[in-house]
Image (spheres, rainbow, N blue to C red):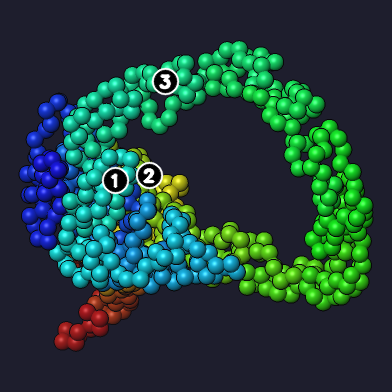
Amino acid sequence: MPSSYAAAAAGSSSRKTNRTSTAAAATARPPAPSPSPAPAPPAANPSAASDSDPSSYSSSSGDEADLTASDSATASVVSAYLSVAGEGADLSKVGIFLSSAARRRSPPCLICFDPIRPSDPVWSCSSSCFAILHLPCIQSWAHQSASGAAVPCPTWGCPKCRFAYPKSQTPTSYLCFCSKTVDPTPDPWILPHSCGDVCGRRLNANLDSGCEHTCLLLCHPGPCPPCPAVVPNAPCFCGAHREPRRCAHQRYSCAGKCNKRLSCGLHRCPVNCHDGPCPPCAVRGKHKCECGETMEEKLCSESVFQCKRECGGMLDCGKHRCERGCHGGKCGECPLRGRRTCPCGKKDYPKLECDAEAATCGSTCEKVLGCGRHRCPERCHRGPCDETCRLVITKSCRCGGLKKEVPCYQELTCERKCQRLRNCGRHACKRRCCAGDCPPCSETCDRKLRCGNHKCLSPCHRGACSPCPLMKTISCACGKTCFEVPCGTEKNQKPPKCSKKCNIPRLCRHKLECRPHKCHYGACPPCKLTCGEELSCGHTCKERCHGPISPPNPEFTLKPTKKKMEKQIECTPGTLCPPCKEVVLGPCFGQHLGQERAMPCSKWRPFPCQNLCGNPLLCGNHYCTKSCHVLEVPLNQPEGDPIASVSKENALAEPCEQCDLPCQRVREPPCSHRCPLPCHLSDCPPCKVLVKKPCYCGAMVHAFECVYFNNLKAKEQLKVRSCGGPCHRSVAKPLPGS
């Protein structure tokens, strides 16, 4: 075994302590062969392989760190093996199974749909699908497939790929992947259901390939990788060229002409170097038939042919002619020569010539008739016996329910319908006069499969239906990352994580400012920037952006059943801006100083405070004693002010109270009479009340207006009060009213 193959196996097989597998795989770089090989292709993207992994049926709650670690380990193994195997080594399928096993996912069993745990006994299909199933499930499946039908079947098929296994290969024990260890012990440091030893399986099962190497990877699921050993002088298909080749690719075409001699022996193969036998010679020419009488233009590979005429040549006897068609060589001996007998074969004529006719013997023919039970009752005769046996016998019908005397040639059937169940065990035979060999059920099963999406299209049968052969594709929103799972298991799957950027354009006003996000399932996430829209009040919206978002792609409608609880966002995308929350000061109805309140701009409204109105009344002397109310004309507002006009139109505006008090002002000049006018702001009118003043002597009384008398000086008042006559009062007695 070449050292390169051993190095590749040492670099690609991870030991039980998986902490050193990556380093071993990364450092394994074997020497290249002497001729310049093709450069090793880069390692395949492990994430892309895992996305299309048919074995990754269900994703458990594994974190992203473990996923990345397993992918890097698988990539290191595959890259080390690929560096040795060279270009063209098909490791995609091997990488898929290794990646799935490294992630330790729990693929469901295709028969029972339950997850396969590392401690469950399993069976792995050794054909092309390498499906892993529960051991009890496949044993029950094989037993039902082999013995469920009316006629026992010698084989049973894999539920996934339908590969036929003989009944002798029904699994009886739990084996590891390489089939060397019975009941492998679960070990957390190695792959589940693996023995941890070297695989040792033959890398190429085809004996004609010339490969005799075995797999040096540790016991693993799925197919073994291509053989990376170097064959120093590997011949091409035609044998004209030799070069060093990898063992897995030692059968190759040199791209030159094959030039092998064809089966005709005249021409050589014009096709490029190819595998398998050469094609028939396609050179056209004129060729004679076998008898040599007809010449036609045909391909060289069809040069030997027969024409449609009879031979007509003379046989060896010289008396009869050949009745065969076109043939080559001599016509042969006469078939009438040799032992000659009568037509019934009872009397011999040893010396009879071939051209003479043998006479009848006269006895009974007694040849077995077509019925197989009776003999011909006629005398010895030439020609065939009468095939219709007319002997009347007692016959039973096929089902045995009717007996009757009928001619031997006539078949007896009754009208009774067979009520036996067919091989499906569900439908009756219903065939008239059935002999018990009921045919297989011709109806379609039409039962719903375990997947719940399709119905069984097989003929009606016993036992459980085969698993649904279809696969469901679960993809991300953009459709560039996907993987397939068996039909029926898609309900428990999570969409794959895609690293591509979301190509759905944003519809909000920040489409040029938002950071790009990765491909996602469902609608795009809402924008996280501030809205910034100008509101009608003059402020800007300071909420999180609530512009419209693009709807999800309707082409991919598969969604997981387990939905994460969505975070509550303040604004629903696609809605109008919420009311302005800017804090402003709002006055009370009466516009009292110091009574303003802080409130949101959208809820700015005047309010009634606890003070009295206090607005000056129209009299100008008193103030309104109502509770705080909306003024018809606010204070200190000039005419034409827009706020004043709005206040006058306010439905809640009400006038201040009317002053009903009398005038309480002190008149000028002061007098004892009150102003007869109601409360007013201007000067009181002159007092016109008549004041009676007697003279000093008491002889007469004078009447004066109050305003006139009060405006006089003291000397003038004494003068106007005097009557001008002699005074008659005593000096000591004062005058009344003085």
Which quadrant would residue 369 be assigned to in this image?
bottom right
- The residue under the point 44% across, 61% down is 166
Q: Position of residue 255 (x, y in %)?
A: 33, 21
Circle 3: element type: loop
Residue that extends furthest to the front in the rendered view of this protein:
351
Residue 49 seen? no
Q: Position of residue 735 (x, y in %)?
A: 23, 82
- Does label 3 or label 1 sit earlier along the sequence? 1
- The N terminus, quarter of image: top left
> Is 366 located above or below residue 500 in the figure?
below
Residues at marks 1 and 2, CA–CA distance in whole angstroms: 36 Å
Tell which of 584 and 298 is nearer to you: 298
Which amino acid is tagged 2?
Gly
Residue 479, label in figure: 2
**Residue 37 placement, left or right of 319:** left
Circle 1: element type: loop
> Number of labelled discs?
3
Front label number (1 vs 2) = 1
What residue is disc 1 on?
Answer: 204
Which amino acid is tagged 3?
Arg
Residues at marks 2 and 3, CA–CA distance in whole angstroms: 53 Å
Tell which of 473 and 390 is nearer to you: 390
- The residue under the point 25% across, 81% down is 737
Graded by Cα atoms within 10 Å as few (under 14), some (14 to 19) or many (20 or more), the crowding at tag 2 reads some
What residue is disc 3 on?
Answer: 261
Tell which of 48 and 342 is nearer to you: 342
Which quadrant would residue 590 be assigned to in this image?
bottom left
Q: Position of residue 650 (x, y in %)?
A: 41, 58
Residue that extends furthest to the bottom in the rendered view of this protein:
733
- The residue under the point 61% across, 12% down is 286
